[in-house]
Image: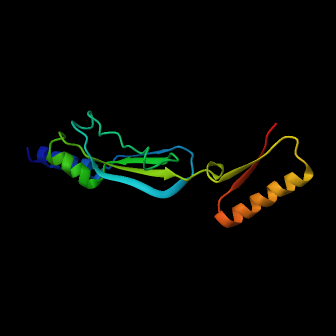
């Protein structure tokens, strides 16, 4: 009887030490903006998942990485509630803006003379130097 009790205590200790961790990378370049939820509520051993993390307004350029994890404290709370409440840690890293996604676009009409092309590129260089933003020169047909 004593060995069975010791084995159960050892199994409980080992299960508390194990922390579930999953990472999803989208391939976009990560930015410094990070959204975290340390106790995202999940129920019945995770059968009822936590609410969706809304990133649309806080990550306008998309998401670079999502990490989910059951930390030691999350597992302890789950153990104490007999698995009814199973919180998890969620961390979302926003993506950086693409180089061409912001800035100004100058349009040069198709029958452009050499003078108008030089003026367009000169204006683009001046705008980029003043605003510290990329400037695109587009030729239309």
Between 138 and 66, the one nearer to me in the picture: 138
For residue 90, above or below residue 49:
below
Give the total number of marks visible in the rendering: 0
Q: Quadrant of the N terminus?
A: top left
Residue 120 quadrant: bottom right
User: What residue is drawn where x is 91% and y is 48%?
Assistant: 113
Task: Residue at 48%, 51% (x, y): give it.
Answer: 94
Judging depth in this view, the residue of 33 and 7 nearest the camera is 33
Task: Find the residue positioned furthest to the left.
Answer: 1
**Is 26 above or below relative to 116?**
above
Tell me which residue sits at (29%, 40%) in the image.
Answer: 50
Residue 65 on image: x %, y %: 48, 48
Between residues 33 and 85, which one lies in front from this camera angle? 33
Query: In this image, 134 relative to 82: left or right?
Result: right
Q: How is the image coloured?
A: rainbow
Of all residues, the one furthest to the right in this rendering is 114
Instruction: Give the left or right position of residue 60, taking residue 110 as reference.
Output: left
Residue located 88% across and 45% down the image: 112
Hey, which residue is sitting farthest top in the picture? 47
**Which quarter of the figure is the C terminus placed in?**
top right
Residue 33 in the image: state x and y as whole percent. 46, 57
In x, y percent, where is residue 59?
46, 49
């Amino acid at each position: 009887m004593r060995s069975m009790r010791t084995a159960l205590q050892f199994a409980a200790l080992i299960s508390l030490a194990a922390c579930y961790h999953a990472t999803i990378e989208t391939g976009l370049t990560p930015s410094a903006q990070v959204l975290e939820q340390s106790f995202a509520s999940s129920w019945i051993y995770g059968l009822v998942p936590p609410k969706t993390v809304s990133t649309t307004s806080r990550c306008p350029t998309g998401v670079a990485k999502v990490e989910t994890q059951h930390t030691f404290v999350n597992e302890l709370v789950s153990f104490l509630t007999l698995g009814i409440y199973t919180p998890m840690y969620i961390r979302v890293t926003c993506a950086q803006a693409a180089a061409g996604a912001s800035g100004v676009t100058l349009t040069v009409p198709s029958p452009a003379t050499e003078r108008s092309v030089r003026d367009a590129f000169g204006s683009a260089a001046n705008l980029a130097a003043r605003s510290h933003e990329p400037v695109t020169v587009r030729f239309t047909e």
